[in-house]
Structure formats: structure tokens, C-alpha cells
Amino acid sequence: MSPSEASQGRAPRQRLTGSERRDRILDAAAACFASRGFSGTTTREVAERAGITEAGLYRHFDSKEALYRAIIDRKMRTPDLLASLGGAIERRDDAAVLGGLARGILERGLGDPDFIRILFFTALEGHALAQSFFEARVRRVRDFLAEYLKRRIAEGALRDVDPLLAAGAFVGMVVDHVNSIVVFGRRELGARAPGDVAALFVQIFLAGLQRSAEDAS
């Protein structure tokens, strides 16, 4: 505790570890990129938002590109959205598979709005790392769902439709909900819990795909 802090009865400020300071810088960079895009953000603005000097920022990240790469890498280290669906897939539980996907997309998108906005900015700017994240996470979810629907159609559980288009329709419903709130400011849509929204989307989707007794005959 410094003499001034002791005399004023204040607790001493805890010194951040290198990892904590790095995370603070990345949080600041994410907020800047989300509001002004990658091209429109300077390292000076990131440093100011993080409460450090630009020289201090460069001790952790040697360029703006390195900052963006670290943000993507940090997001890539989060658990895979498909990892929790194994049991539902084995049981052929269509509602659970679709519901798990929808709820996961909603919770992650609404829980990290800055990252959603960063993806929009950098995709429009043609940034290669945005494409790599899309291929590794976003497209993988759609391709998985298309293969799952294809298998369920072949088993006779669902109507015979184009599985890739059907997968895109389902994911599109969910992603549109996230984008409407995060990108276009439709805050009123966020009044319902992600689980409730996911259940509604699953109900709507399966109502159009599940085969009736007449279809099976």
C-alpha cells in the first residue's frame, strides 16, 4: 500500500498479471473493432481504452493484426458447439439436436455481441481470419446439420427435402434472431429466454419436416 492510499484508507490496487493485462487489452480491442471495424481502429485507440500506453500495448501485441488474431484464437478455444450433442444424435432425437444447436447459437451470439459485430465488419472488409473462423465454426455447424437431416430423411423420419437448404433455413432463423438484436438493435426481441426462442424455432421447423401418418402410408 502506498502512503497516500494508507492515509486515505483505500485498499491498494492489485497489480495485474501478464495474462490479465493481455485479456484486458483483447477486451478493449474487441470493443473498438466492434464499434469501428478493423480498418477503422488504431492501436492508440485500443491502448487508451485498455488504460495503457501504446508502447505498453506493443509489449503484448506487435500489431493490430496480432490483436485480431488473438481475439479469434481466444474464441476458437471455447468449447465446440457440437460437443454436447452426442447423446441426442445417437438417440435420433431431432428436437434435442435442433434445440441444442439453436440454444447454443443464441447463447453464444447474444452473450458476446462484440464478436458478432467484429465478424460482420471483418467479413465485409475481406479479412482472411474472418473466413477461417467461418469455416471452422459457422460452416461446420451448417454442414453437420445438413448431414444429420440427410440421414434422418433416408431413415424415413423426415420429409424428402434438400438437406443443405433445410439446414440453412434452420440456422438462418436462429442467426437472424441474434443479428436482429445485436446488429439492428431490436432489443424487444431479447425479452424471451434463449431456451424458449430455441424451442419455438424447433417447433416451427419440425412442423414442416416431420412426416405424417399419411406420408408414411
Image (cartoon, rainbow, N blue to C red):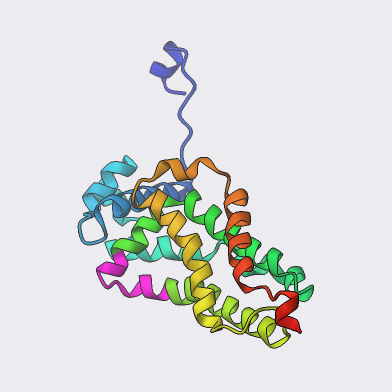
Numbered range of the magenta stretch: 122-132
Quarter assignment of residue 52 = top left
Q: Position of residue 59 (x, y in %)?
A: 33, 55
Q: Nearer the viewer, residue 85 or 33?
A: 85
Q: Position of residue 122 (x, y in %)?
A: 30, 65
Q: Position of residue 51 (x, y in %)?
A: 32, 40
Is residue 196 one of those drawn in magenta? no
Q: For this view, does 206 lie left or right of residue 90? A: left
Question: Could you tell me if residue 80 is visible in this image?
Answer: no
Q: For this view, does 160 lie left or right of residue 96? A: left
Question: Could you tell me if residue 145 is visible in this image?
Answer: yes
The quarter of the image holding the C terminus is: bottom right
Q: Position of residue 154 (x, y in %)?
A: 69, 88
Q: Nearer the viewer, residue 71 or 2?
A: 71
Residue at (53% x, 76% y) in the render: 166
Q: Is residue 18 above or below residue 5?
A: below
Residue at (33% x, 50% y) in the render: 184
Q: Is residue 134 above or below residue 150?
A: above
Q: Is residue 74 above or below residue 150?
A: above
Count of residue discs: 0
Is residue 123 one of those drawn in magenta? yes
Secondary structure character of the magenta stretch overall: helix
Q: For this view, does 102 lie left or right of residue 54? A: right
Q: Is residue 28 above or below residue 217?
A: above
Q: Nearer the viewer, residue 4 or 71?
A: 71
Residue at (64% x, 80% y) in the render: 159
